[in-house]
């Protein structure tokens, strides 16, 4: 559908696109959406309504003279959000996906975990493939099962911790590193 729109729309067309790039990695989707907006603006010159969750696209208003940002007005207080069903000028200053999920009936525990992950993502971001740098939460289980060679891994870690790098020559440090690397490779 998008290809057909990009290939056939004219300055007399009204183009309505919703969530272009959904179902791809974060950066793939953002890149596609960005390029599509530029194409519609520069080549097709179509009147376009473009709904997206990519807040980064708000910046296109600065570089593309015909782009205008609009968002759905929201009222917040405490931890509550009310969507006012009014379209107002400007880009949204934040996302309300977790609030919408709560309204849709997502279990409380899932929403709480989503808030934790969001907080970490806002600090740590994603890698360039749109994958989270955040480790999954620790599982609440009974006894921890150690691997068969766990003790050897701990020995290597202990040896690294006990090194006095300030007294070693660069050659000695490289030799020690090579020795530890060989030991670690033999464990795998």
Image (spheres, rainbow, N blue to C red):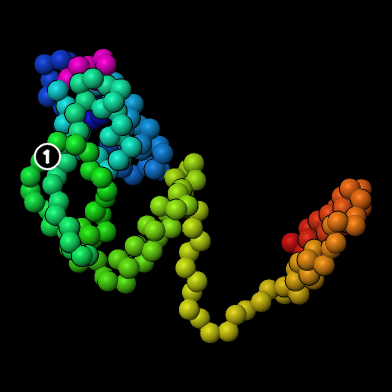
How many neighbours does mark 1 have within 10 angstroms: few (below 14), some (14-19), or many (20 or more)? few
Q: Residue at x 43, y 58 (%)?
A: 120
Find the residue positioned furthest to the bottom: 142
Left or right: 166 in relation to 8: right
Q: Looking at this view, is 19 or 5 the one in front?
A: 19
Find numbered disc 1 in the image and state the secondary structure of the residue it sits on. strand
Residue 38 image point, x, y percent: 30, 23
Q: Quadrant of residue 55?
A: top left
Q: Residue at x 87, y 53 (%)?
A: 173
In magenta stretch: residue 45: yes
Residue 28 image point, x, y percent: 40, 37
Q: Quadrant of residue 70?
A: top left
Please give the range of residues in magenta: 41-46
Residue matched to label 1: 88
Does residue 8 appear in this view? Answer: no
Q: Is residue 109 above or below residue 135?
A: below
């Amino acid at each position: 559908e998008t290809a057909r729109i990009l290939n056939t729309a004219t300055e007399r067309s009204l183009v309505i696109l919703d969530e272009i790039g959904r179902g791809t990695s974060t950066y793939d989707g953002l890149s596609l959406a960005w390029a599509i907006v530029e194409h519609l603006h520069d080549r097709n010159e179509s009147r376009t309504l473009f709904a997206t969750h990519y807040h980064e696209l708000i910046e296109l208003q600065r570089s593309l003279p015909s782009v205008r940002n609009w968002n759905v007005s929201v009222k917040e207080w405490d931890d509550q959000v009310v969507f006012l069903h009014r379209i107002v000028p400007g880009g949204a200053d934040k996302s309300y996906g977790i609030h919408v999920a709560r309204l849709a009936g997502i279990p409380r525990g899932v929403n709480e975990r989503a808030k934790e992950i969001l907080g970490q993502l806002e600090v740590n971001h994603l890698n360039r493939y749109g994958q989270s740098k955040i480790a999954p939460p620790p599982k609440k289980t009974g006894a921890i099962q150690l691997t068969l060679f766990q003790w050897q891994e701990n020995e290597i870690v202990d040896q690294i911790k006990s090194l006095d790098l300030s007294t070693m020559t660069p050659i000695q440090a490289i030799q020690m590193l090579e020795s530890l690397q060989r030991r670690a490779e033999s464990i795998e």
